[in-house]
Image (cartoon, rainbow, N blue to C red):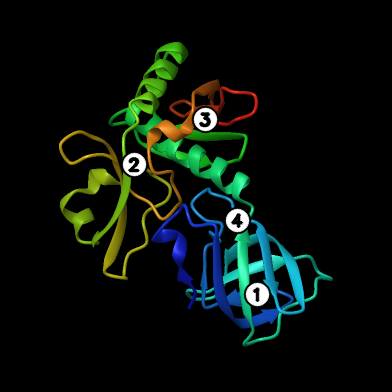
Amino acid sequence: MTKRLFLEDSATSTMTAKVLHAGTDGVILDQTVFYARSGGQPGDAGTLHWDGGHLAVTEAIKGEGEAILHVAAADAALPPVGATVTGTLDWPRRHRLMRMHTALHLLCAALPGVSVTGGQIGADKSRLDFDIAEPPQREALEASLNALISGDHPISAEWVDEAVLDSNPSLVRTLSVKPPRGTGRLRLVRIGTAESLIDLQPCGGTHVARTGELGRMRIAKIENKGRQNRRIVLEFAQEDATP
């Protein structure tokens, strides 16, 4: 099992860990800040350093069970099992992905009651597909999204009993992917406060601490992907993509 430090604090970019496995499939550590690809969010990249060597992690992916594999180039030197390594994220890339992921949650909040049929998070562009008959008005939707961003709302995560989905199934906005069941608990990401709630969804991804970190977003395009399926593509409004 790999302890997922990113679930406790998405802003942590370095860690020390013990090597449990090192092979052609990747390196497994006892704990990591590297997010493993899932839910439409790419896996993190970065570096691992140990006494006498280092390797570039091209992406973190899920392994068997609860393991996370830190994948490297095929010819990379691997750390010995039992060694202590220092891991460092490619933070600029991770932060962009965090901002994009949070922006997609806000896009859901700007379209209340509309279900999501698919999505993909990227460092430059991201998209969500919505189950909606008529495409939303682009300028009005972009204005609503940026109003939520400029409100600088806090973002937090909490663990709850998974039975909360039985009493409140509307928490799940996605039609194609459902939160995993069977562990007994569920991670909810909240934007806003209990008194002024913007969005609340099950999510295992990484997010920024406040919506103001996003900077202005632009709706790049809205596409028809079926009789009742509309794809909305987001990008950073600033050329350098910094808030």
Indicate which label's residue lies in the foreground, 3 or 1: 3
Residue 39 placement (x, y as % from top left)? 48, 52
Inter-mark Cα distance, 4 to 1: 14 Å
Inter-mark Cα distance, 4 to 3: 21 Å
Task: Give the residue at the far front of this rendering.
Answer: 51
Task: Give the residue at the far bottom of this rendering.
Answer: 82
* Precedes in sequence: disc 4 or disc 3: 4
Secondary element under disc 1, as helix, strand or loop, is strand
Amino acid type for the residue under numbered disc 2? Arg
Q: Which residue is mark 4?
A: 44
221 horizontally vs 107: left or right? right
> What residue is rendered at 54% in x and 28% in y?
233
Inter-mark Cα distance, 3 to 1: 34 Å
Q: Which residue is mark 1?
A: 27
> What residue is rendered at 37% in x and 38% in y?
210
* Precedes in sequence: disc 1 or disc 2: 1
> What residue is rendered at 31% in x and 34% in y?
153
* Precedes in sequence: disc 4 or disc 1: 1
Q: Which residue is mark 3?
A: 243
190 horizontally vs 34: left or right? left
Secondary element under disc 4, as helix, strand or loop, is loop
Which quadrant of the structure image shows residue 26? bottom right
